[in-house]
Image (spheres, rainbow, N blue to C red):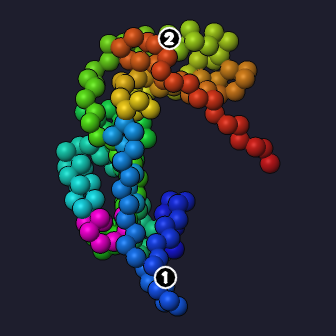
Amino acid sequence: MRRVRGISCACTLSLAFVTTPALCAQTHTLPAGREAIEATEGRALSEWDGRVAQMIRRGDLRLREDEPSEDGTHRNQWYQQQHKGVRVEGGDVWRELTDGKTTALEGTVFSGITVDPVPKLTRAEALAAFQALTPDGAGPSLPPELIVLPRPDGTYVLAYRARIFTSAGATVYALDASTGAEVSREAEAEVPKN
């Protein structure tokens, strides 16, 4: 069993009393052109490695973090998916390299994104819209971030995303970057205090 960023990959094939590793590579196409990547060997790893390398060259994946493993035997790299320079919410890829060769890939990428990456609302207009949503709140904790937001119906929307604190706690909102209409709202779970 292999542990990859908190997710275990137990791919074994049991034959009589012998347990041998089987191909551990999965690609799942989900709504909104979402593809889940889990590849550790064989043809799937080779194909995903080529696809990820192509996405990096085109600028569709941007390196977010690169660090050696604790034991120094390999490198861990984390990439964020971009659409014409705008971050795609939930589009992330982890890659493990050993001696410069990809040995594992995991993550999620989105395809078929065609939204115009230029917002109609300015960041200042988005900030005012966020403040109007929560008049009792302190406003966003950071400036609103422009993102491409995959929607459950398979479409994408260019949106501004911000975390807003109120007396009830923190909530992450997304507003359509063309109209200012709310497209999502998610309350953050409170972290237990020790």
As drawn, the residue found furthest toward the right would be 194
Whether residue 124 is situated above or below residue 72 in the rendered picture: above
Which callout, 1 or 2, points at the residue further toward the start of the chain?
Answer: 1
Quarter of the image for residue 30 reads: top left
Residue type marked 1: Ser
Give the CA separation, mark 1 to mark 2: 57 Å
Magenta stretch: give its range.
39-46
Q: Mark 1 points at which residue?
A: 14
Q: Is residue 34 in sight in this rendering?
A: yes
**Direction from residue 137 to residue 105 in the image, left or right:** left
Principal SS element in the magenta part? helix
Q: Name the residue under label 2.
A: 129
Label 1 packing within 10 angstroms: few (<14), some (14-19), many (20+): few
Indicate yes or no whether the magenta region holds residue 148: no
Q: Residue at x 26, y 69 (%)?
A: 43
Q: Which residue is drawn at 58% across and 18% down?
A: 139
Q: Which residue is drawn at 44% across and 12% down?
A: 180
Q: Which sits in the foreground, 117 or 29?
A: 29
